[in-house]
């Protein structure tokens, strides 16, 4: 009987460790590239012990151990890195994976921010959960200030119609509910694909000719630093749209991947979008 | 004979109506007598090439399906069962991953075509025994290769960390939206060539279905006929995959739908499957681009959604499933 109770007690201790309210976790695993960027921006880069194979920014993130993809990370790899907390997002990570982690008594933090208006709160919440509230508040305040600056300066003239192309062949545009859609609105434009029913609709060439945009913005191929390969792919598309003023007047712009992730670089992406809209 | 003439006339009429509808209807209706510049561009450089590609692909798949079901003596055969499409998909995806641009804007279609032809060749070699092609060997070699290539494609996709590649592979799953004129002559050449051979050997195909011995006694060499028809199917399927990726359903079920109405005589079945396949893909693409503009739905999904219930209805209503 005594043996039993000791065993039970030991098991109990191992299974339910006293929840330690350590100020800042020492070992953090990030399961999403935008969360990795936020962790680095919050000055927690040194504590990140594992990232996904998608986490390529900032460059230091590439040197961290990989635990697999976003939707299919390796549970073993995550567990073996002995994280104090696993940072995840509802935008790309599986809920089941998070439940599995919790059933193994690993602490998780799930960010629910998906849109630009959620970002400031997202940063603050993450900072609070990881014990770097002050830094996070500063980052969020800076972000808000820059956002307000863009919104305050309404562009002159009528609103411009923007078509943001994420892949030229077949033609995929950024539609409603995406960070890019938010960014276009904040920058003072109209997203031409904003009324589709999918987030990333396969967009009709006919529709572009019927209702042409004032500017075309083409996102990069995520594999490359420059936009060389995407330019090659886009050539065919643009030659088919060559009768449009937007192509004739060279209102086609290749932008960085800053808007592809909701994180610290998003604001830079909005600023960039605004710059090309003013050109 | 008179009823046959009426039938052919009727088919031509329906086919022309489908072509006209595909050209002039869509997300916006085009009035051919009042066209401005934009409308002309839409009609001639967006819709027309799309319609032609749909007809070529549908024709190729329908005819290939009918021929393959005959030479393999199997009602479940379709042009993709020979692994040709998986080979094409693998070659195209590798091209996209490696960022190849050896053939300029034609790179992906050309790679797909090469992948398809090479796969067809391997299946042919594996299916070859004692001086000829054997139906069961062809079928099993095709299924085996198809699994291998699909697995390699999956491997490629799961190793690649980019969303971009995933989008690029949409191409593989049937996309007509970017069709343009430049590639058309080559597609036409191979599809027309394959179709011509199939029609020319349709009588021999009838004999092949009855078995090799009867084929012999009817004066055909089974191995020679099977080889010719296999090459014809390979060319048509390869051209179709290169033109617009993979479109399911047509190759498998359109020949059966044609068989419900015309019976199993391949002299009529092969051309009817070709025409029906072309018309079906045209209609499917028309629906796909008109339903929720400005968004487009892949034609391959629509073909199956409208085709499969119709097929099941026929299966229930008509008693014969003669093969």
Image (cartoon, coloured by chain):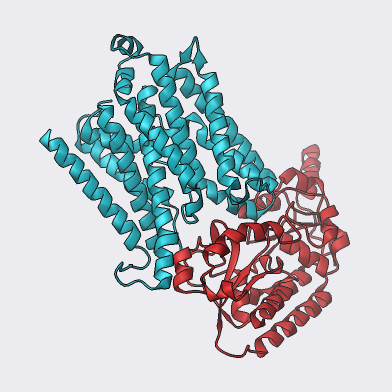
Chain colours: A red, B cyan
Rendered location of residue A241, percent (x, y): 52, 67
Choose top left, top right, bottom left or bottom right for residue A245. Answer: bottom right
B256 lies above or below A68: above
Q: Residue at x 64, y 55 (%)?
A: B164
A75 lies above or below B209: below
A179 lies above or below B54: below
Give the position of the C terminus of chain A as an image quadrant: bottom right
Choose top left, top right, bottom left or bottom right for residue B193. Answer: top left
| Nearer to me, A276 or A274 | A276
Rendered location of residue B59, percent (x, y): 37, 41
Task: Kindly tell me whether residue B185 is visible in this rendering.
Answer: yes
Rendered location of residue A201, percent (x, y): 51, 62
Q: Residue at x 37, y 62 (%)?
A: B290
B273 on left or right of B301: left
Rendered location of residue A128, percent (x, y): 77, 72
A155 on left or right of B308: right
């Amino acid at each position: 009987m005594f043996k039993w109770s000791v065993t039970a007690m030991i098991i109990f201790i191992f299974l339910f460790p006293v929840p330690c309210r350590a100020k800042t976790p020492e070992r953090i695993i990030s399961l999403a590239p935008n969360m990795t960027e936020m962790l680095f921006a919050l000055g927690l880069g040194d504590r990140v012990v594992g990232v996904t194979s998608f986490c390529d920014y900032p460059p230091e993130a590439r040197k961290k151990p990989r635990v697999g993809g976003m939707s299919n990370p390796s549970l073993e790899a995550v567990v073996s890195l002995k994280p104090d907390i696993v940072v995840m997002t509802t935008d790309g990570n599986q809920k089941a994976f998070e439940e599995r982690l919790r059933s193994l008594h690993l602490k998780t933090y799930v960010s629910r921010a998906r849109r630009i208006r959620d970002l400031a709160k997202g940063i603050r919440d993450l900072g609070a959960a990881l014990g770097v509230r002050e830094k996070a508040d500063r980052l969020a305040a800076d972000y808000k200030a820059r956002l307000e600056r863009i919104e305050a300066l309404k562009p002159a003239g009528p609103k411009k119609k923007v078509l943001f192309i994420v892949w030229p062949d077949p033609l995929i545009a950024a539609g409603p509910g995406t960070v890019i859609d938010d960014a276009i609105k904040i920058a003072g434009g109209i997203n031409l694909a904003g009324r589709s029913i999918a987030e990333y609709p396969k967009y009709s060439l006919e529709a572009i000719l019927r209702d042409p945009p004032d500017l075309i913005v083409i996102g990069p191929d995520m594999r490359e630093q420059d936009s060389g390969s995407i330019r090659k792919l886009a050539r065919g598309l643009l030659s088919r749209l060559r009768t449009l003023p937007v192509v004739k007047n060279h209102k086609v712009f290749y932008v960085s991947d800053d808007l592809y992730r909701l994180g610290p670089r998003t604001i830079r992406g909005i600023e960039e979008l605004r710059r090309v809209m003013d050109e | 004979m008179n009823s046959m003439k009426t039938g052919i006339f009727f088919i031509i009429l329906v086919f022309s109506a489908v072509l006209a509808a595909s050209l002039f209807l869509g997300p916006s209706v085009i009035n051919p007598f009042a066209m401005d510049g934009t409308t002309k561009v839409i009609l001639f450089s967006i819709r027309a090439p799309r319609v032609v590609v749909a007809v070529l692909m549908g024709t190729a798949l329908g005819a290939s399906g009918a021929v393959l079901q005959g030479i393999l003596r199997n009602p479940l055969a379709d042009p993709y069962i020979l692994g040709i499409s998986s080979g094409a998909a693998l070659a195209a995806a590798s091209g996209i991953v490696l960022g190849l641009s050896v053939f300029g804007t034609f790179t992906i279609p050309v790679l797909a075509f090469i992948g398809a032809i090479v796969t067809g060749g391997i299946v042919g070699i594996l299916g070859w025994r004692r001086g000829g092609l054997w139906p069961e060997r062809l079928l099993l070699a095709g299924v085996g290769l198809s699994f291998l290539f699909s697995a390699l494609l999956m491997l490629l996709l799961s190793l690649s960390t980019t969303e971009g590649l995933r989008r690029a592979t949409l191409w593989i799953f049937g996309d007509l939206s970017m069709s343009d004129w430049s590639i058309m002559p080559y597609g036409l050449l191979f599809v027309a060539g394959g179709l011509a051979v199939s029609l020319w050997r349709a009588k021999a195909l009838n004999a092949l279905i009855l078995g090799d011995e009867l084929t012999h006694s009817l004066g055909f060499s089974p191995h020679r006929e099977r080889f010719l028809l296999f090459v014809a199917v390979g060319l048509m399927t390869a051209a179709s995959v290169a033109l617009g990726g993979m479109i399911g359903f047509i190759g498998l079920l359109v020949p059966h739908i044609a068989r419900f109405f015309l019976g199993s005589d391949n002299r009529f079945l092969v051309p009817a499957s070709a025409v029906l396949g072309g018309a079906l893909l045209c209609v499917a693409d028309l629906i796909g681009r008109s339903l929720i503009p400005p968004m487009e739905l892949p034609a391959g999904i629509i073909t199956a959604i409208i085709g499969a219930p119709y097929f099941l209805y026929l299966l229930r209503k008509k008693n014969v499933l003669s093969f």
